[in-house]
Image (cartoon, rainbow, N blue to C red):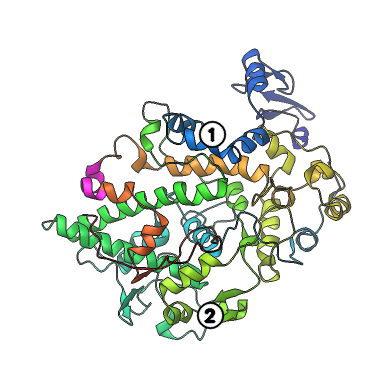
Amino acid sequence: DPCCSFPCQHSGLCVRVGTKGYECDCTRTGYYGTNCSSPEFWTWLHDALKPSPSSLHYLLTHFRWLWSAVNRTFLRGLLMRVVLTGPPELPEAELVAEELLLRRTFHPDPQRTNLMFAFFAQHFTHQFFKTFGKMGRGFTRALGHGVDLGHIYGDNLERQHQLRLFKDGKLKYQLIKGEMYPPTVMEAAVHMIYPRGTPPEQRFAMGQEVFGLLPGLLMYATLWLREHNRVCDLLKQEHPTWDDEQLFQTARLILTGETIKIVIEDYVQHLSGYHLKLMFEPELLFGTPFQYQNRIALEFNQLYHWHALMPDSFQLPDREYTYDEFLFNNTILTQYSLETLVEAFSKQRAGQIGGKPNINKNLLKVAIGTIKESRLMRFQPFNEYRKRFHLKPYTSFRELTDDENMVATLEELYGDIDALEFFPGLLVEKTYPDSIFGQSMIEMGAPFSLKGLLGNPICSPEYWKPSTFGGASGFQIVNTASLRKLVCLNVQRCPYVAFQTPDLGEAEGSEEKTRPSTEL
């Protein structure tokens, strides 16, 4: 099949003709010619004037004085609108992972990303990354394809009903040492994945069946459980005539808005390293052509395999935990308390995702499975994806990475830069200076991420109004949400909490008693 050599450039579609021929459909690509390789005039002009991704990234991560001024003017809103060959057989996936991705030495992230961020990323993305194994690798059980909070409320109505208290809009819970935690599976009969022999009292029931795996995931599940029930109390106070269903559904909408606000203004802001202050203001897109829907691509799922964030051990106040001691150990949360884990994870540095072999040996099997999945689903080579996202394809392994040992290994495994696969390419690509990952991860991931967030129906003109969230007070909860508020309104003691480890002295004096919420 001549189309297997990817002759059509610039997103042109290849159609096989006869037994040996092909045609490229260049419709609306901005290019023409046999292989869609010749730019039309306006395309040529646009490309000539547009700064390169590396130049734009440099501008956004330097000149703090300039961005401090921009962040205080109308220009910030304007800029937010813009932000939106080789061997006959590929090498064994196990060999690729061991040679290119396996950690020999822990490389901490230069942006001071911490485990609070790493666990947030896992918890947040598991609402839309849910491969439907029975159907095949290309299918998902997360039919919402976006931020629907299925990881909190379940991905189907039956699971949701098992988790609900059906009183005052709340979710089921249990009290341990006077504090709220998820119920056990005896109290909420949902399917959860736990090893055989796990005591019944340690089998917590949550919206996502895999969240018993890590105490960090249970920590976030507990935070959002407390937040949902806290919001229900506030709504009940303001709307005493509302029934359980209206309280529950409105609280869910509020938590959806809170999630998107935190992801854009705390999570994506940290990832970007930009001095431009990102903001969640759906009104910026009103009046422009925009589709309020989303579709999760399998490539986006693979791009988000950030297992290099995970450290070699987990540091808590009085001891260090190995993987064997940490996995499925839910007693860690109840033993130390929610605020203690938040502070410990906020102070422990996560690993750098790109540029170096940095995946812990306990997680390497996930990387191996990812490479095998990409081959099964017939992903195109890494350079083809760079072309698809209007990035210059690499011409050599030395251009891809500055590590000479890595260059030699890549030459031995793949032979040609155009044979390099998608997932390994993302992880071995050299990073931007002082950045967590490289150009391709940023340029490919950003459009998927922001479209998925702002494409949520609650961001549309029909939904984005106070009445959707129970009135002006509920709207205020959404518009003032932050990671710090999520934690500090739901614990007794407000700890140091951020997606970045503290500077020296930054965490001092951060503790404060939580006062009753006066948001409504």
| Quadrant containing the N terminus in the rendered view | top right
Kind of element beneath mark 2: loop
Residue at mark 1:
66
The one nearer the camera, 42 or 431, is 431
User: Residue 469 colored magenta?
Assistant: yes
Visible in this render: residue 210? no
Q: Does residue 412 lie above or below 79 as drawn? A: below
Q: Position of residue 431 (x, y in %)?
A: 70, 48
Q: Residues within 10 Å of mark 1 (few under 14, many from 20)?
A: few
Q: Residue at x 78, y 30 (%)?
A: 19
The stretch in magenta equals 466-474
| Quadrant containing the C terminus in the rendered view | bottom left
Q: Does residue 453 lie above or below 207 as drawn? A: above
The one nearer the camera, 377 or 345, is 345
How would you classify the magenta stretch by its main secondary structure? helix
Kind of element beneath mark 1: helix
Q: Position of residue 344 (x, y in %)?
A: 51, 71
Left or right: residue 392 compared with residue 325 = right
Callout 2, which amino acid? Pro
The quarter of the picture where residue 167 lies is bottom left
Callout 1, which amino acid? Leu
- Disc number placed over residue 31 in the picture, else none: none
Residue at mark 2:
195
